[in-house]
Image (spheres, rainbow, N blue to C red):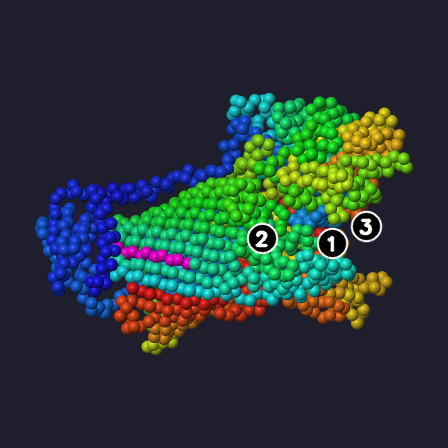
Amino acid sequence: MKKANRFTVLTLSFFLTLAISSVCYGQSEAGDNIIQGTVTSVTDKEALIGASITEIDANNRVISGTTTDVNGHYVLKVRNPNGRITVAYIGFDKQILKISNRKTLDVELAEKDNIMQTVEVLAQKRQTQGGFSIPEREVSTAIQRIDTKEFEGLQVSSIDEALQGRISGLDIVANSSDPGTGTSMRIRGVTSITGSSQPLIVVNGVPYDIQVDQNFDFANSNQEQYANMLSINPDDILEISVLKDAGAAAIWGSKGANGVLMITTKRGLSGPTRIDYSYRYTRTVQPKGMNMLNGDQFTMLMKEAYFNPRQDKDASNIPEYNYDTNNPEYENYNNNTDWASEVTQPGNINDHYVTISGGGERANYRVSGGYLFQNGTIIGQKYNRISSRANLDYRVSDRIRFGAEFSLTNSDNDKNHAGMKIEGVNWPSILNYAYQKMPNVSVYAQDKDGNNTNKFYNIPTTSGISYDQRVMPNPVALASLAKFNEKALRITPTFRLTYDILNPEKQMLRFNSFISFDINNSKVSRFLPQEVSNTYWDGTNRAEDSESESMNIFMDNNLAWQPKFENKDHSLLMYGSFQLSTGSSTWQNILSYTLPSSAAPDASNDAFLADGGSSHSSWRSLAYMFRGHYAYKTRYIADLTYRIDGSTKFGEKNKYGHFPGVSLKYILSDEPFLKESLPGLTMFAIRPAWGMSGNQPKWEYLHFSRYQNYGTYIDMNAVKPSTLQLSNLKWETTNSFNLGFDVGLWDKYIFDINLYKKNTKDLLFPDVAISQISGFGSLSYINGGEMNNSGWEVNFYANNFIRTKNFGVDFTFNLSNYTNVLVDLYQGILDSYNGDFNYQNGSYLTRIQKGNSFGSIYGFRYKGVYKYDKYIAGIQEDAPVAKDASGKAILDQNNNPKYMYFAYGQTTKYRFRGGDAIYEDINHDGSIDELDIVYLGNANPKLNGGFGPTFRYKNFYMKMFFNFRYGNKIINQARMNAENMYNDDNQSVAVNWRWRVDGDETEMPRALYREGYNWLGSDRYVEDGSFLRFKYLQFNYSLPKEIIKPYHLEKVNLYLTFNNLLVFTKYTGVDPEVGYGTLTSSRGLSVDDSATPRTKDFTFGITIGL
Amino acid sequence: MKRKFFIYSLLVVVFSFSSCSEWLNTKPESEIILEEYWQSEADVQAVLASCYRGLTESSVIYRMVVWGELRSDNMITGYGFPSGLYDMQRILEGNLTTVNSFSSWGSFYSVINYCNTLLHFAPKVIDRDNNFTEFDLKRVEAEALTIRALAYFYLVRTFKEVPWIEDASINDTQNYQQAKDSEQTIISNIIRDLLIAQQSVPLDYGSKEYNKGRVTQGLVNSLLADVYLWNQEYDKCIAACDKVLTNKQYKLVNGANVLSQVFYLGNSNESIFELQFKETVNENDAIKVLYGYSSNSLGSIGFPVTLAHDPGENEQPGAYSPFKYRVNSTVTESTDDVRATDSYYQYGGKYYIFKYSGVMRMESTNGKSVYYFRSNTPNWIIYRLSDVMLMKSEALVQKDGKDNFNKAMDLINETYLRSNESGDSLRVASYNTKIEMEKLVLRERQRELLFEGKRWFDLVRMARRDNSTSNLNTYVDHKSSSATSSTLGALVMDAMYMPISRWEIEANPRLKQNPFYEENTSSTR
């Protein structure tokens, strides 16, 4: 017993000494009242080493203290010779003794009785938000909580992965499975279409949003969107509450419109020190992607593709496809390279995690540290993360409490130098390159005998092959030589103080204050060496370094008052809060081209300094908030919230925003008449709620007309007006109504149902084009539009619905749906976002339209392939001629059928021939043009959700979880690229079924090199993205106490998890889980461009507790 | 007592910030806000520098090439059009639509806005900075007026009618939807501004780079001459040209040195105004991509075989070449013209641009040339002396009459002879008619100003005089070897001008599309 506690004692005494020494300091003038003595054990009379002796005042506040030495002796200077001291030692009963002017006081402590008596604890789960704590059953807004126990043993590097499918109304889609990339998250659909539909994350009461400098916002932010959740180790999270309706989210006012995710981290619990160590090993495997052509099939296709447009043998005389042994490059073009498998590899994750926690009467602590190392499934991807978190709670007295939290995350992510935008050019993912790269080309340059040399092969610039292939990087070289490293360090210390101004026994008046710092440093270095491609342009040996630093301080002072009423039917809680935040960030960037060698990939080396810059920005905001909670007979409940937000982002006119919220709850099942008549109905409550919340523009300083450095001309430094002043910009406001029902049957089956309607006004739109005669291309933001969202959600839990002594089954299920309609939009926005049809292959007419959902897809209807070239009435009907509504060919005055054209009357007009794609001629005018474009579907799912049972048998658990989305449409661009037969890009094996000669009946048009319109944006590539994924299957076994006891172990748990076991889908791409596009990139469409698909993996894990 | 103090201090903490609306005022740190700008002469000079800097944007230089020459007979596809230049490809195919990115004029209006902003705020600085005098103000305004006039002159030549904007754009409450002004309004405004500028612009800044890279009397007069010539006011054009030609600052460079001195080194004696680039500060990306440089010697733009003459390789010039041009059975122009060998070069049967991209050309003993390409960034010349000489000769020819022809011929011979050292001077007797003289000027301008962003405007000027595009089309069709494609030029007069970008019309519905490109779509959004 004593032995086991040695460590605890040391740790505790360390903390106590720390705390006490500070208290003692400066109290020597209190007089020379010294008390001393020895502390011994009653049973064996042995001295107790390290027992704590503290003097306490009337409020049990510690005013001085010490610990016993090796002889169990102590000396304590006391302030009040008539006060009290406590003597405590772990494992022994504490004693409180009156000093009564004594100078010597020996104490004998008795060992704690180990026999526990049965105690019945009546407690209610409470919902706590800062100082605002109410019983959970009295919560009247739409909040869903999830305990992270649910995810124990899963391998997730970020908590959002684990949340997927768990919370109704929260739609999470992984952007890709590249290490360190985040997810797109939407609570109850999109309320804002400014690109930021992501919910606000609040960690222990502190908003966790990083404000970045406008310049630092790389154009690829889509990928990084929620990577910031990565900096919280999932193992440190205790529970997550999702605030879904504005009644609840109104407490975050101008930032809450997209919903709020509140994360509470684990804290230390009183008790002996516990040490937990867990280790998880995960092996990840990428699912097999598209089947691509090999080199031989490809060159055959290309010969045909070059021949077809001109019907000329010479056109297809391309040296790279000729297998001509006289060609000095012959060996480099006679291969069958499977580029996709060249760049993929099985990945693995090693995750270590240690926690030390414990606490005593005065202090609780929890310290954790984790190390995660991941190899991605694409070569060259490495991710390293060290995270640590420490929580300390210290009770100074019964009335004053002090707490500190500290967290640190350091990550080092080697990504692929792809999947981003560099100088306006999109670099697709490595996998995307691998699918496009010509398969007859070799990875390494080959000598004349066909042996690989140690140099990567790149198509020379003098080659006659199309430009895109010529400059396309060698994917293997790009993955192995190019560098894209992102290092991030985030430190967030928080200090808290709670003080009960009045005696909490009588009534609660509690002052709560905390200040939190968020320090964030990140450094991105990129290097693109010459060896990866043969581009002549400035993009080679290009190094870019950028660094950003930001620091945010958030302060919250609040006062909670809960009077005690004589009449126990009333209960009231009032809460007022004042929040303040301030922050600043700096950013700098250097970009160099044409560095002398790839051995020195540092942008600051001697080279052409192409670009460089730095910027600073700072922001502040404040908020006043009032909340009230009133319950009568604990079944008539009303809540009120009012928040006023002020921000530096707006000009004088609109600095402050007002966000009220009201919610009511009526717990019918508590009515005596129902209790008697329907005893099985353990809960039935109705919750109506209304609230307002808002959304801010992303950037600061919009209400100024600003002047910016503009380089130099000759030797004159130039400064230009860089922005137009936005004098009328204001918050985007969401009004939301929620009607909720809580139903509980026999305490076993719980339903939680919500219906909602949201209306968002003054939608913020970024970068709206204005007439260029202003000298500016666009306004950074305008308020212009209105959008409605409505939907419903159902959560269902069945806890232990089958239960025997050794066996139990739980089941959870959730389902949600929403629809989204753009009610009104400012004409200028429509004009600026809605491009016209560009008469080009491969692109969809992207538009946002009043009365339709955001994310709607418009395009042609694909009807297969013209079987014949020449029309012969009745015999060769399936030929490219114009037909009227009844399907009869339209004839001219000479009785010849009119040909079918693309864009008749335009210079781009093209006559369709046999083997070309058929598009439905909606208006039967014999010309396929923008008038034949129709609505093809929507990127928003009709239903999404998840379900899964948990089986428990003795010490053995089995958890299964499924998630699904239903009814969303995806544009399969990867397939479009792999079936267009238009360029020198590699194609999928599906093109082997292409139309070759008259009469071929197929769905696959003929190969046409840079001719024709066989791959217009049509429903051919719009696919149903519905899926049902067997997300994980987990086995969990805790070793019985009898086995581990001899090894002094508290617990040993073993896990085996299979992730992403099966996907049921009709989608033909690799993975139907495709992230949402942003407004600017794809008008909210989901576009599958071969991002790294979700991997299939298995995890083995072990947790050992001491 | 102690508790009370504690509570009070808490209240102070809670409410200390409550009345601070100042708290919510932050100002940008890396930018300056309008309220704090325009305090000193340095602020004025910095915005003036932006007016010039704006002209060096590659979006501007691209347009100077595309609007001024791409549509003419001088340019075809060169080596491997990068997909970013897709819209140029479309223009070369004669497929010019309202969605073509070169139909957007934003980069020129940005420059115009810098000028407008300067003209709006600079007068206020006089009261704030004692060192900034009325004289300084006038000089700065003159520079801004000239740059604005230059920008509008490009717009009016390209679009014919554009909105004339004089107000500085400051905030979102201003009306940015303005209708087009007539061509005559724009031109008379340009002339008005240039005449004002003329009174205050310096002759000499005391430094070579300033004298060639900033607004000088030379630029104002050259620009005036060009505007008058466009507006068919020939006497005024001649008078303006004379002011330049009498300026001793400007001298023609020896013909053999033109390539290296005028186009490689830059800021030569014959240069009047050229946009200054420096690789460490501001690369001339557009010209490097389009014309080529050392690591990419094959530029994206090529020169048609039908127009080329390649004395070293092939004595027989292309069918429509201005070089080795047979005027009649006895007279042949430019038989040994150094411009034919220095302006472009042959590679793999195609011709690529050497002007601007080259450092020098060395002829080996067997008559073959070795080409050396530049690795740095070229200046872009807007006006040089030979251009002004040929403008004057064009005006003289238009005035008709033997005497004028003689004067014109003297000027033509100045540029002609320096590049044809072994050749005879050209004589009026060989041409005689106004039509022949006109063609000669056009030919000499083509030879002299090849790839300098002038040719299309020369052809449009001719078509405006003809009031027909048929001659223009004849010239433009010369670049196409196949006889079938005759739509490269302009079907009607209006087709010589660019369409207004469709997005621009959507953002500004008061604009009316250039009639040739009007679409009768009834689709609404």
Image mark for residue A176: none
Relative image position of residue A521 (x, y in whole percent): 43, 47
- Quadrant, the C terminus of chain A: bottom left
Query: Are the numbered discs 1 and 2 placed on the same chain, yes or no?
Result: yes
Badge 1: chain ID: A
Q: Which residues are magenta?
A: A363-372
Distance, label 3 to label 2, CA atoms, is: 40 Å
- Label whose residue precedes the other's in the sequence (1 or 2): 2
* Disc 1 element: loop
Mark 3 neighbour density, 10 Å: few (under 14) some (14–19) many (20 or more): few
Q: Amino acid at mark 3?
A: Ser
Q: Amino acid at mark 2?
A: Val
Determine which quarter of the picture holds residue A163.
bottom left
Image mark for residue A908: 1
Between residue A154 and residue A773, name the one nearer to us: A154
Badge 3: chain ID: B
Q: Amino acid at mark 1?
A: Thr
